Image: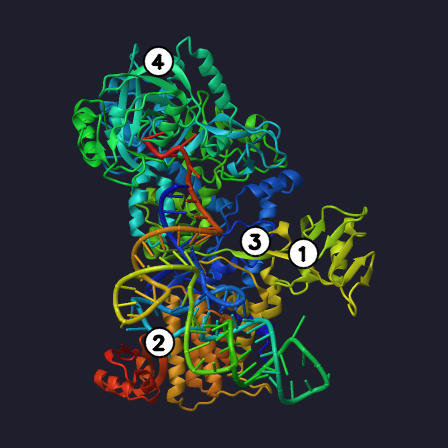
RNA sequence: GCGGGUGUGGUGGAAUUGGUAGACACGCUAGACUUAGGAUCUAGUGCUUCACGGCGUGGGGGUUCGAGUCCCUCCACCCGCACCA
């Protein structure tokens, strides 16, 4: 029987499906293990060879865990709401539901082709009403809760209104933007609308005015990544920031817990760092500065209260609420002019041009509460409205930006810290001794910080405060293809949650997907849907992409439950995700949001764990080689002139790079990839505008269907292309579809090859050339069972010691390597093992049956086939992973490297049971060592039993 | 600028605790079998030298009997963050 991957793989895929081999039960005595892949957005272009890398790794791990006796949950689904489908709908009129479903089918086919052990009965699609019913339900819970800072958890909003009824809000410590204090009487006297507005300042899901990227020309709101350099990516139209009433989630309430609990999870250091940077905790003081001639105060936040004696001016964000009031009539013109300038600048410009400081003087003065000096109040774009309080006390001696600002506008600078004891310390380092600071003089900075904090509090100038960079997440999208909000508004605009019984609120059908006027979602045009009931209108925005993906891993636990998002029984069995595999692009967004949702559900008592993902692995990107041909920029005649890259570089021609479809290339992926005449013809068929172009290479010139040799004996073109490693993408024509590779080599080979490329976490270019090595390995593996004539070779003989040793070396290494997710080295071990057994001509069942199971997680099809060939009747998935027996690795003798002064001079076999002294003696008497030590003094001999011997001579 | 990571043959990569650097492959060279080979098998393959030997894990320095691995310093590339008070 010959190794025929195509037949084998088809056969076993069907068997697995027919026998429901990968169906997982929630009722099991086995320990649980949950392996999760970040689910894909089903894009129109399908999977390329880079996408399955993580899926293969997680599939191997799942299969391995199952063979080790775990009940393994390994599900898959689709993040199916999203902008591309909607944009496609706008241009083609095809309903997003339809195109999304087609894409899902295509993905499913591609995934199935790779032999994954997914339990498809648990598939989720975020766009499915039976799924987004629960996304809406969780949103309503967020709407119905606030965050209590004393209890440190989310509490139902009814409990808050009960407190308001009794005591007002003075005693409430909550995560809130509510500033005004009110009494119980005041609360009761408020109108329904006023109450709604106040509660919005407490709810975890709430409405507030936020800014969107509005593009007048396209008549739509754009996502941040659709805006490039202040203009729309499509069309290049101007984009302005427009205020809009939008839903947000109060993730900031959970900032501290999101930061603290990073200690609980096994993520890479860089991943944790990215998250903690994003959260951006800083400790400092909130302080109020009096304004000369005004009752108002300016609130600031500072991490350096110690430098207060050096605070010689203040800066407000240009958008700060007090700016208008503080601006004197003399300064009005210059302030207005400056604000106009700021408005003209895009967010991107304000962020990218850091060097230049700009600002304007308001004409007003504040009082430094420590020096009692009057200090000028400026506005400047380097102070951000959204960070801290939107106002700073400026200390030009100890902050680079304040210093540049003071320099430019001639403001007073007082040195308050002597850094002479700390050479190399920069302005921002919290190091030095206080000077020019009255009673702080002589103190070290950390002590001075503590002292000023105490004084600020005792003098009631402010208080200690912790500040976070993390912002609340904007949760509204002015789009059609997302989850509708289960919210209606009455005539006064008060938000009312829908009755949970009436969920899901389904998306209405639509034919025209263009946005409605005024930046509203297309839903605003569906009048009979918007009119919920007499006087009540529905919210017409939809939820963002991260809504559905923030909790999907919980749905997999009990995917078809119509009563709950997942039953408590299922959640308590599966608990959390043991291993999460996905790309770094979700490092902050998705992971942060889903950790936040999970903590909220934990507060509600609905999940038993504080963190959703125990361990995270980030797979690297598989890059593609991009092949370019050079088009000369200066041509002698009218025709386009393509030129061999070698020639162009030698001559120093100015050229444009034209990407070429990689299928046209000969020797693709190698350093001397080129276009032959055949390839040039294919290129011309593809790009007819170059039909008459000239293609020049060292061998000759091809033009108008004819190749004229310039070198003797040349019969074909060898137009060398320029190769670069880059993204695998449609626009570079270098996308490799896994289906094509599977068609040629089989999915077992594909799986092994992707793992063999290198560590999962690392990015690496796709290189089809070396796949042959893995294919050869599979055939050699097969040849342990069948010879070329097709005879079955397997015998029942007792294996030799050497054969056991080869097998158990592999068992040991593969087990260890899987445990540390080093899959590439596992494949090497398989090769070493098979090479070794072939050398021994070992066709013994006892050895081979263990080897089959060892390989099964990586190459499940061929393993299943051979498992049955050697006489098993049930699936290899129900076998037990081979146990390592150290007895087989015990050696009689050990090869010792013998070194002189650390340099290896001999390699000798010594009996394993020799003592250190015996080894030393034997080594010194070796003939090949004698010549190195003759006439020299032996200073020392180092013997590490079972490792090495080193002789130190003078 | 700050934070994290990476740097090893012609190529992808291996070396788990400081102990034989280059496993396993690709590629290349030679040979065998073949009408043929982009099939298969065998041998070789870090660089350098006729050889003995010498040199070798981005550069320089250090610790050690011994360093790819630990320490210091510099360089290059990748990722993340960035007017963050």
Say which label, 4 or 3, has the lower sequence index.
4
Identify the residue under disc 2: A903
Q: Residue at x 48, y 62 (%)?
A: A56
- The dot on residue A108 is none
Say which label, 3 or 1, has the lower sequence index.
1
Chain designation of label 2: A
Residue A687 coordinates in the image, percent (x, y):
75, 51
Do dots 1 and 2 share one subunit?
A: yes
Element assignment for label 3: strand
Cα distance in 3D space between marks 1 and 2: 46 Å
Residue A248 coordinates in the image, percent (x, y):
41, 33
* Any part of residue A518 in sight: yes
Say which label, 1 or 2, has the lower sequence index.
1
Do dots 2 and 4 share one subunit?
A: yes
Identify the residue under disc 1: A650
Say which label, 2 or 4, has the lower sequence index.
4
Do dots 2 and 3 share one subunit?
A: yes
């Amino acid at each position: 029987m010959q190794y025929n991957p195509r037949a084998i793989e088809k056969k076993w895929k069907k068997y697995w499906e027919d026998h429901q081999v990968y169906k997982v039960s929630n009722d099991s005595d086995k320990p649980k293990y949950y392996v999760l892949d970040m689910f894909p957005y089903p894009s129109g272009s399908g999977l390329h060879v880079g996408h399955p890398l993580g899926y293969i790794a997680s599939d191997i791990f799942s299969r391995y865990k199952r063979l080790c006796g775990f009940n393994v949950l390994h599900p898959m689904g689709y993040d199916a709401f999203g902008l591309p489908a909607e944009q496609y709908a706008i241009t083609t009129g095809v309903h997003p539901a339809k195109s999304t479903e087609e894409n899902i089918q295509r993905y499913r086919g591609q995934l199935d082709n790779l032999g994954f052990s997914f339990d498809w009965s648990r598939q989720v699609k975020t766009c499915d009403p039976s799924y987004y019913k629960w996304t809406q339900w969780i949103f309503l819970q967020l709407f119905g809760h606030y965050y209590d800072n004393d209890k440190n958890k989310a509490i139902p909003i009814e409990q808050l209104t009960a407190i308001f009824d009794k005591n007002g809000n003075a005693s409430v410590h909550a995560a809130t933007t509510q500033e005004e204090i009110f009494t119980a009487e005041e609360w009761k006297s408020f109108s329904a609308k006023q109450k709604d507005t106040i509660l919005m300042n407490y709810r975890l899901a709430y409405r507030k005015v936020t800014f969107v990227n509005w593009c007048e020309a396209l008549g739509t709101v754009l996502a941040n990544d659709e805006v490039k350099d202040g203009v729309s990516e499509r069309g290049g139209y101007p984009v302005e920031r427009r205020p809009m009433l939008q839903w947000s989630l109060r993730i900031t309430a959970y900032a501290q817990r999101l930061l603290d609990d990073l200690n609980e999870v096994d993520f890479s250091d860089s991943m944790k760092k990215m998250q903690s940077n994003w959260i951006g905790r800083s400790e400092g003081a909130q302080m109020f500065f009096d304004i000369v001639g005004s009752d108002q105060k300016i609130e600031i936040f500072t991490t350096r209260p110690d430098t207060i004696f050096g605070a010689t001016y203040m800066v407000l964000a240009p958008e700060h609420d007090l700016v208008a009031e503080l601006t004197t009539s003399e300064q009005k013109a210059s302030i207005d002019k400056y604000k106009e300038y700021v408005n003209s600048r895009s967010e991107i410009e304000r962020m990218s041009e850091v060097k230049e400081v700009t600002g304007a003087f308001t004409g007003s003065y504040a009082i430094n509460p420590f020096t009692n000096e009057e200090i000028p109040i400026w506005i400047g774009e380097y102070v951000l409205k959204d960070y801290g309080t939107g106002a700073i006390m400026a200390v030009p001696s100890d902050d680079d930006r304040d210093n540049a600002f003071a320099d430019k506008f001639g403001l007073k600078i007082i040195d308050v810290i002597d850094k002479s004891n700390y050479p190399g310390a920069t302005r921002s380092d919290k190091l030095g001794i206080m000077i020019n600071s009255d009673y702080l003089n002589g103190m070290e900075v950390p002590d001075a910080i503590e002292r000023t904090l105490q004084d600020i509090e005792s003098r009631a100038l402010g208080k200690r405060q912790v500040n976070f960079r993390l912002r609340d997440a904007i949760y509204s999208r002015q789009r059609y293809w997302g989850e509708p909000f289960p919210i209606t508004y009455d005539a006064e605009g008060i938000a009312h949650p829908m009755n949970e019984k009436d969920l899901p609120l389904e998306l209405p059908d639509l034919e025209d997907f263009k946005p409605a006027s005024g930046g509203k979602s297309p839903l605003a045009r569906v009048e009979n849907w918007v009119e919920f009931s007499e006087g009540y209108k529905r919210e017409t925005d939809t939820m963002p992409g991260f809504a559905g993906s923030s909790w999907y891993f919980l749905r997999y636990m009990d995917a078809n439950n119509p009563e709950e998002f997942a039953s408590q029984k299922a959640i308590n069995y599966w608990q959390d995700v043991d291993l999460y595999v996905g790309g770094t692009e979700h490092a902050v967004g998705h992971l942060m949001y889903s950790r936040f949702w999970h903590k909220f559900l934990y507060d509600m008592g609905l999940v038993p764990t504080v963190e959703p993902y125990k361990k995270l692995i980030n797979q690297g990107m598989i890059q593609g080689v991009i092949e370019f041909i050079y088009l000369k920029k200066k041509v002698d005649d009218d025709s386009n002139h393509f030129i061999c890259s070698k020639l162009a570089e030698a001559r120093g021609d100015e050229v444009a790079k034209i990407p070429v479809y990689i299928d046209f290339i000969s020797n693709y992926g190698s350093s001397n990839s080129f276009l032959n005449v055949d390839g040039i013809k294919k290129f011309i068929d593809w790009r007819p505008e170059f039909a008459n172009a000239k293609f020049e290479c060292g061998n000759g010139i091809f033009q108008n269907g004819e190749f004229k040799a310039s070198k003797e004996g040349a019969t074909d073109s060898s137009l060398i292309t320029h190769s670069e490693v880059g993204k695998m993408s449609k626009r570079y024509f270098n996308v490799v579809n896994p289906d094509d590779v599977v068609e040629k080599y089989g999915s077992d080979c594909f799986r092994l090859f992707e793992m063999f490329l290198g560590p999962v976490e690392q990015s690496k270019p796709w290189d089809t050339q070396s796949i042959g090595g893995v294919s050869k390995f599979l055939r050699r593996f097969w040849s342990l069972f069948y010879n070329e004539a097709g005879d079955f070779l397997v015998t029942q003989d007792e294996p030799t010691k050497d054969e056991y040793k080869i097998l158990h070396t592999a068992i040991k290494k593969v087990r260890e390597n899987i445990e540390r997710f080093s899959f590439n080295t596992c494949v090497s071990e398989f090769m070493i093992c098979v090479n070794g057994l072939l050398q021994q001509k070992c066709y013994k069942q006892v050895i081979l049956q263990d080897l089959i199971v060892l390989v099964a997680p990586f190459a499940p099809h061929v393993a299943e086939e051979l498992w049955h060939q050697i006489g098993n009747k049930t699936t290899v998935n129900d076998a037990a992973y081979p146990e390592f027996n150290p007895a087989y690795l015990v050696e009689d003798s050990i090869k010792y490297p013998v070194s002189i002064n650390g340099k290896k001079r001999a390699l000798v076999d010594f009996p394993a049971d020799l003592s250190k002294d015996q080894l030393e003696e034997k080594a010194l008497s070796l003939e090949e060592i004698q010549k190195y030590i003759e006439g020299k003094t032996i200073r020392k001999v180092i013997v590490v039993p079972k490792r090495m011997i080193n002789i130190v001579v003078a």
